[in-house]
């Protein structure tokens, strides 16, 4: 049987189409994609104290040690994936411990310092995209339930560029699907290419004018203008990428594989749909890194209303402040359980998809968690890391850390497993060799 390269293209008149992975292709395990996915929820988790009646069932962190840990009901939906997950306790960003905890979503994936002037930095997904972007149509997929960027200190996105500026998130399932898998309606490839060239020319003029203006400005204004021009350069890069990929047809994905009618007023279906879109993006190798912010901190946005819509006795932020009420910890814990069940379904879909000699889950590292334990305490992040076994990760245990180990060590471990060659990230002191 003839052996084909995985990047073999079907070439027709004026177009090329990438083939799926076929049995006859010479696919070496090390040549298959490595991916990473980061999912965030706000406001901490239910952690009733030991003497509280809800402690046994609704304490988010498991009991026990190492591989002998026991899940409570909060994470019980993850039990079938026990061999594919690690639970991390005690980690946090040192520079985030003393700031208002509701600002820490901004730095969850950056480790940036926003304790004084707001000086955020690049997020780990964008570090990873530097290594993976040459192989995919989209450098990264940035998603949230609210969309956009929110506002400073109450961000609506997890992703930040190299200047520490927020990258807008997409929230509408149909827009996300069309961006990934649909052509521009009513335009031929040549019309799209002409439009992109016009955009490129305009950006060139903007950059040239900006460079001339920079020479006339003081230091502070030069820094602000450079920040703006960095964003323009990123748009320019994406324009060139889009033009380069015009000759490669987008993957064919049936619309019945995902519910494009899902809306935030049905949280279960909406969150499932966002997970489905990330799955399809990974399966089609449209991108190799994605972020999803389920909801924003401090009662902001539509995502905060998900528990209330589901009947969990209030919005997410209000649940975190209602532990003194009757069954308060239980209400909060039941929403933790709901979110865990959504994650479990995503992991199962990844695990059920074969890729080469392993599964899509084995080649995708998923980090799920929050940047607070209790709603106003930015320490002891609740973190689950799943998948990535074919990328070198080891699972099956609960790991407890002291505050001497920064959360950036976990982020750097995932980045390196996904192909990044960076030896440091933010305030990292190493990597988590235990996973």
Image (spheres, rainbow, N blue to C red):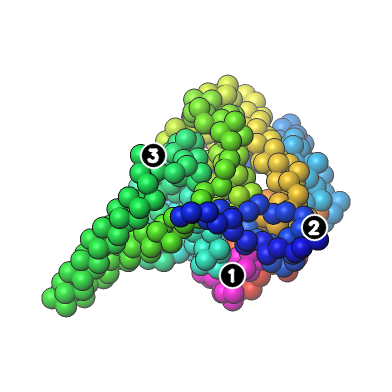
The image quarter in which residue 415 lies: bottom right
For numbered disc 3, what is the local secondary structure?
A: loop
Chain-order first, disc 3 or disc 2 = 3
Furthest residue in direction top, as rendered:
311
Q: Residue shown at 25%/63% (left/top)?
A: 201
Q: Nearer the viewer, mark 3 or mark 1?
A: 3
Query: In this figure, which residue is indicated by the disc labeled 2?
Result: 357
The image quarter in which residue 387 lies: bottom right
For numbered disc 2, what is the local secondary structure?
A: loop
The image quarter in which residue 331 lies: top right
Q: Nearer the viewer, mark 1 or mark 2?
A: 2
Considering the image in quadrants, where does the N terminus appear? Answer: bottom right
Mark 3–mark 1 distance (CA, rounded to whole Å): 36 Å
Query: In this figure, which residue is indicated by the disc labeled 1?
Result: 420
Q: What is the magenta range?
A: 415-429
Query: Within 10 Å of the Cα at label 3, are there few (<14), some (14-19), or many (20+) other Cα atoms?
Result: few
Answer whether labels 3 and 2 touch (C-beta < 8 Å). Answer: no
Considering the image in quadrants, where does the C terminus appear? Answer: bottom right
Chain-order first, disc 3 or disc 1 = 3
Q: Main secondary structure of the magenta part?
A: loop
Chain-order first, disc 1 or disc 2 = 2
For numbered disc 1, what is the local secondary structure?
A: loop
Query: In this figure, which residue is indicated by the disc labeled 3?
Result: 185
Frontmost residue, 358 versus 213: 358
Answer whether labels 3 and 1 touch (C-beta < 8 Å). Answer: no
Query: Within 10 Å of the Cα at label 2, are there few (<14), some (14-19), or many (20+) other Cα atoms?
Result: few
> Would you say 396 lies left or right of 364 here?
right
Q: Residue shown at 60%/44% (left/top)?
A: 280
Above or below residue 274? Residue 248 is: below
> Would you say 118 lies left or right of 246 here?
left
Mark 3–mark 2 distance (CA, rounded to whole Å): 38 Å
């Amino acid at each position: 049987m003839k052996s084909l390269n995985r990047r073999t293209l079907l070439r027709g008149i004026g177009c090329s189409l990438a083939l799926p992975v076929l049995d006859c292709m010479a696919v070496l395990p090390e040549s298959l994609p490595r991916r990473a996915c980061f999912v965030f929820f706000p406001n901490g988790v239910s952690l009733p104290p030991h003497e509280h009646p809800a402690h046994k069932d609704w304490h988010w962190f498991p009991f026990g040690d190492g591989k002998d840990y026991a899940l409570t009901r909060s994470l019980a939906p993850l039990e079938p994936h026990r061999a594919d997950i690690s639970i991390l306790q005690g980690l946090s960003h040192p520079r985030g411990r003393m700031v208002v905890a509701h600002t820490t979503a901004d730095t969850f994936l950056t480790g940036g310092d926003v304790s004084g002037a707001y000086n955020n930095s690049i997020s780990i997904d964008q570090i990873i995209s530097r290594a993976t972007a040459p192989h995919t149509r989209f450098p990264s997929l940035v998603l949230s339930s609210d969309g956009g960027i929110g506002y400073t200190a109450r961000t609506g996105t997890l992703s930040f560029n190299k200047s520490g500026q927020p990258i807008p998130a997409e929230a509408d399932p149909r827009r996300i699907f069309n961006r990934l898998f649909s052509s521009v309606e009513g335009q031929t490839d040549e019309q799209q290419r002409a439009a992109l060239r016009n955009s490129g020319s305009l950006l060139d003029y903007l950059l040239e004018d900006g460079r001339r203006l920079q020479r006339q400005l003081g230091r502070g204004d030069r820094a602000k203008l450079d920040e703006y021009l960095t964003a323009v350069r990123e748009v320019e890069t994406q324009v060139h990428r889009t033009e380069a990929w015009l000759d490669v047809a987008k993957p064919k994905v049936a619309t019945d594989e995902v519910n494009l009618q899902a809306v935030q007023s049905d949280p279960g279906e909406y969150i499932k749909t966002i997970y489905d879109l990330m799955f399809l993006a990974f399966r089609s190798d449209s991108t190799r890194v994605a972020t999803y912010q389920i909801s924003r901190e401090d009662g902001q946005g539509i995502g905060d209303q998900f528990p209330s819509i589901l009947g969990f006795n209030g919005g997410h932020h209000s649940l975190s402040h209602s532990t003194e009420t009757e069954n308060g910890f239980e209400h909060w814990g039941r929403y933790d359980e709901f979110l865990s069940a959504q994650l479990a379904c995503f992991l199962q879909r990844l695990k059920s998809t074969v890729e080469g000699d392993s599964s899509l889950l084995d080649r995708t590292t998923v980090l799920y968690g929050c940047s607070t334990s209790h709603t106003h305490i930015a320490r002891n992040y609740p973190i689950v890391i799943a998948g990535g076994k074919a990328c070198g990760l080891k699972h099956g245990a609960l790991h407890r850390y002291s505050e001497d180990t920064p959360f950036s060590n976990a982020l750097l471990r995932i980045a390196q497993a996904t192909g990044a060659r960076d030896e440091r990230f933010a305030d990292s002191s190493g990597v988590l060799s235990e996973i």
